[in-house]
Amino acid sequence: MEKENILNDVYHQIKRHSKFDFEEQYDLNTLWTVGSYFLGYDDIRAFDHFPMLAFMSPEPDSGKTNALEVT
């Protein structure tokens, strides 16, 4: 039996509800989502700087809003 963890849970939820071109984009979105959790705690100094996440596409109706809502 595979041991479950929060990264796997978040990854599978993002993959279930979003469509990205590259597999690495699921990894990036997962790490950003979990990392952003720590920004809400002043007593946990995990990051001095944290990147912004942007969903961009030249096409309308490409899933940008959906990806943002899932994240």
Image (cartoon, rainbow, N blue to C red):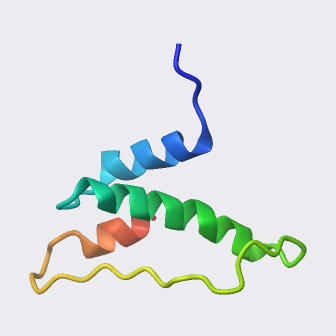
Residue 28's x, y, as percent?
41, 63
Determine the residue located farthest toward the left in the rendered image: 59
Q: 44 above or below 6?
A: below
Horizontal arrangement in the rendering, residue 14 relative to residue 59 (left or right): right
Q: Is residue 70 visible?
A: no
Q: Residue at x 75, y 72 (%)?
A: 46
Work out whether residue 41 or residue 63 is closer to the camera in this orientation and state it. Answer: 41
Q: Residue at x 70, y 78 (%)?
A: 47
Q: Residue at x 9, y 81 (%)?
A: 59
Horizontal arrangement in the rendering, residue 43 relative to residue 7 (left or right): right
Determine the residue located farthest toward the top in the rendered image: 1
Q: Residue at x 81, y 75 (%)?
A: 45
Q: Quadrant of the C terminus?
A: bottom left
Residue 26's x, y, as percent?
35, 56
Q: 12 above or below 31?
A: above
Q: 15 above or below 45?
A: above
Q: 34 above or below 49?
A: above
Query: In the figure, residue 18 lies in which quadrant?
Result: bottom left
Residue 29's x, y, as percent?
42, 63
Q: How many numbered dots are placed on residues in this image?
A: 0
Residue 16's x, y, as percent?
32, 45
Q: Is residue 34 visible?
A: yes
